[in-house]
Image (spheres, rainbow, N blue to C red):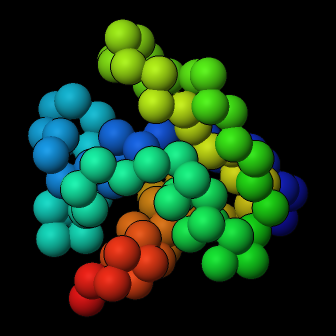
Amino acid sequence: MKEKSIILYPVYFNSKCPRSKGRRVSKSRAVKNPTVDEIYKAVRALGLNCTIEKDKHHPARWFEREGRVVVSTTLKKTQLIKEVAKKLQSIRGGK
């Protein structure tokens, strides 16, 4: 399969944000206020290439410049999000 770039925003993994505002994982898999640095560490721990863009923002949250992580992978976006969510929990010392 051809590698593609997938963009991950912190809001995808934020347990304090409702799904209607951008969260992509269940609350049981989400963490409280993740940072782009934590997401970057989680992606790198999965063995994937990625870059941080700190001056970017989620389209629905244009007023908060949380940044984003651009990942080069052959995985589907939903699969990548689930894997990163699991890794974020282990980085935070969760389940």
Q: Is residue 78 above or below residue 87?
A: above
Screen quadrant of the C terminus:
bottom left
Name the residue at the bottom extreme. Answer: 95
The one of 37 and 75 positioned closer to us in this rendering: 37
Instruction: Give percent across and percent down for residue 34.
Output: 37, 52
Instruction: Give percent across and percent down for residue 50.
Output: 75, 54
Q: Residue at x 70, y 70 (%)?
A: 44
**In the shown orientation, is residue 51 left or right of residue 87?**
right
Residue 10 in view: yes
**In the shown orientation, is residue 78 left or right of residue 70?**
left
- Asked where in the image residue 3 lies, by quadrant, the reply is bottom right
- Asked where in the image residue 47 lies, by quadrant, the reply is bottom right
Residue 76 in view: no
The one of 21 and 15 positioned closer to us in this rendering: 15
Q: Residue at x 27, y 83 (%)?
A: 94
Q: Residue at x 86, y 57 (%)?
A: 2
The one of 85 and 55 positioned closer to us in this rendering: 55
